[in-house]
Image (cartoon, rainbow, N blue to C red):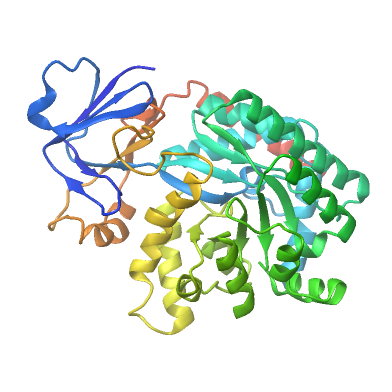
């Protein structure tokens, strides 16, 4: 890990309040930001230099809900057409995840990781399922993450949909990885306890998950009311709403992530706010699956911390941000809402969620993690703290990421990935995915 000096760029710190700095340099040492100084202070600093002329330098983006393995579904045409969300799960995703091997888990993570790096995403919260290759699957994903140099919080999706044995194996895989990650003390890899969704978890399995997670003082990562079926089936089987059930079982809390939250009532939002549970909005996935658009404006008024995820639709967080704003305006039939709140999902709320697991990420700040990206951008109008959101949504979103640094390690420079086996990996991924499709 080399010392790095970034110079000649426009620094956007994403602190609270945000600062936009010109004529400054950033000195990285030991994987953290050592100093941010006026350019005249460059004397006597010996380091590898990154010339950020014509670029905006800012913290790497954070994706708070992802499925790495979905990268092997791209172009798959064998799934039967679906008329609703349950059929999407039955016809595509639950068929695909049953056919995954551990090699598939490893290589699909590499492929998704390449795309994340190319778009400046440096921290990812992944939610995994491979019920016929459960044992060791998180280890394979973690191996790929380490090789890529990213940060990731991993979990295995426990569900009763494949039977009691598969559910128990999912519990055991979560526990293995939770224990391994704590022993390793690696600040690039963290663990949560994964759950699929309320409607695929019976009482016995859910209680067992809560008991096991409680012993390890670990939070959960779960799909929450993504489709209306989650609410209707949960109410029919258990006599209560999804969030009420999760609350009653002790699943909510500030170390838990509830993804989607499209179909919630006011009382459920209040429970999420009261327990400080994080929620993740995934607008492109929700539109693609025609399940609806979560009302993040209501969530914000209720005091819920709402972040932004991709649900594997893209590796590009700025594409997801734009979708979030436009979809929310359409939902409210009001073009004057959701701009500032939408931007905050990405640049404020995602860092707050990530900091619950990875301290000191998400800001350019002395002593904080050196997770830094440089984006090609020459502002055509004044760029300061007030105007930065407009530049982010309408300018930077259309620009190219040039350099990516995570923990002081350069993962991409001059748009060239440092991962030496990218072409070989892509070829291997094609071979494995072709075999996966034949098994589908």
Residue 421: x percent and y percent?
52, 22
208, 8: nearer the viewer: 208
Q: Quadrant of the N terminus?
A: top left
Count of marks overlaid on the render: 0
294, 348: nearer the viewer: 348
Residue 284: x percent and y percent?
53, 63
Residue 312: x percent and y percent?
58, 51
Q: Residue at x 56, y 24 (%)?
A: 424
Residue 104, quarter of picture: top right
Residue 277, quarter of picture: bottom right
- Left or right of residue 310: residue 74: right
Residue 232: x percent and y percent?
78, 76
Examine the rendered structure and indicate whether residue 360 appears above or below residue 235.
above
Residue furthest left in the image: 40
Q: Residue at x 55, y 60 (%)?
A: 276
363, 393: nearer the viewer: 363
- Left or right of residue 25: residue 294: right
Residue 182, quarter of picture: top right
- Left or right of residue 163: residue 45: left
Examine the rendered structure and indicate whether residue 383 appears above or below residue 262.
above
């Amino acid at each position: 890990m080399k010392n790095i000096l970034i110079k000649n760029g426009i620094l956007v710190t994403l602190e609270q309040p945000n600062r936009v700095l010109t004529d400054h340099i950033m000195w990285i040492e030991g994987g953290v930001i050592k100093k941010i100084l006026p350019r005249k202070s460059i004397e006597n600093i010996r380091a590898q230099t990154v010339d950020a002329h014509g670029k905006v330098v800012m913290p790497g983006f954070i994706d708070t809900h992802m499925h790495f393995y979905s990268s092997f579904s791209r172009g798959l045409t064998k799934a039967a057409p679906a008329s609703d969300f349950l059929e999407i799960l039955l016809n595509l995703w639950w068929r695909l995840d049953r056919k995954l091997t551990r090699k598939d888990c490893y290589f699909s993570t590499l492929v998704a990781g390449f795309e994340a790096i190319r778009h400046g995403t440096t921290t990812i919260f992944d939610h995994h399922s491979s019920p016929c290759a459960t044992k060791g699957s998180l280890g394979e994903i973690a191996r790929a993450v380490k090789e890529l140099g990213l940060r990731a919080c991993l979990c295995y999706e426990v569900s009763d949909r494949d039977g009691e044995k598969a559910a128990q194996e999912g519990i055991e895989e979560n526990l293995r990885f939770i224990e391994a990650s704590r022993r390793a003390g690696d600040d690039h890899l963290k663990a949560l306890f994964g759950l699929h969704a309320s409607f695929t978890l019976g009482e016995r399995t859910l209680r067992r998950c809560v008991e096991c997670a409680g012993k390890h003082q670990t939070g959960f990562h779960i799909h929450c009311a993504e489709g209306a079926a989650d609410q209707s089936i949960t109410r029919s089987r258990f006599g209560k709403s999804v969030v009420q059930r999760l609350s009653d079982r002790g699943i909510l809390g500030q170390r838990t992530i509830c993804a989607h939250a499209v179909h919630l009532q006011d009382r459920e939002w209040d429970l999420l706010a009261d327990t400080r549970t994080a929620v993740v909005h995934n607008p492109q996935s929700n539109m693609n699956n025609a399940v609806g658009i979560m009302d993040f404006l209501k969530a914000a008024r209720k005091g819920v911390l709402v972040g932004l995820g991709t649900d594997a639709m893209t590796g590009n967080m700025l594409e997801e941000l734009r979708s979030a704003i436009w979809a929310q305006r359409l939902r409210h039939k009001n073009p004057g809402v959701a701009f500032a709140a939408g931007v905050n999902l990405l640049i404020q709320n995602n860092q707050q969620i990530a900091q619950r697991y990875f301290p000191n990420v998400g800001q350019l700040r002395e002593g904080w993690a050196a997770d830094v990206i440089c984006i090609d951008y020459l502002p055509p109008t004044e760029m300061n703290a007030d105007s930065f959101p407009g530049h982010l949504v309408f300018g930077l979103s259309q620009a190219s990421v040039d350099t990516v640094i995570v923990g002081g390690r350069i993962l991409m420079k001059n748009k060239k990935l440092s991962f030496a086996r990218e072409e070989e990996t892509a070829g291997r991924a094609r071979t494995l995915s072709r075999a996966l499709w034949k098994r589908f």
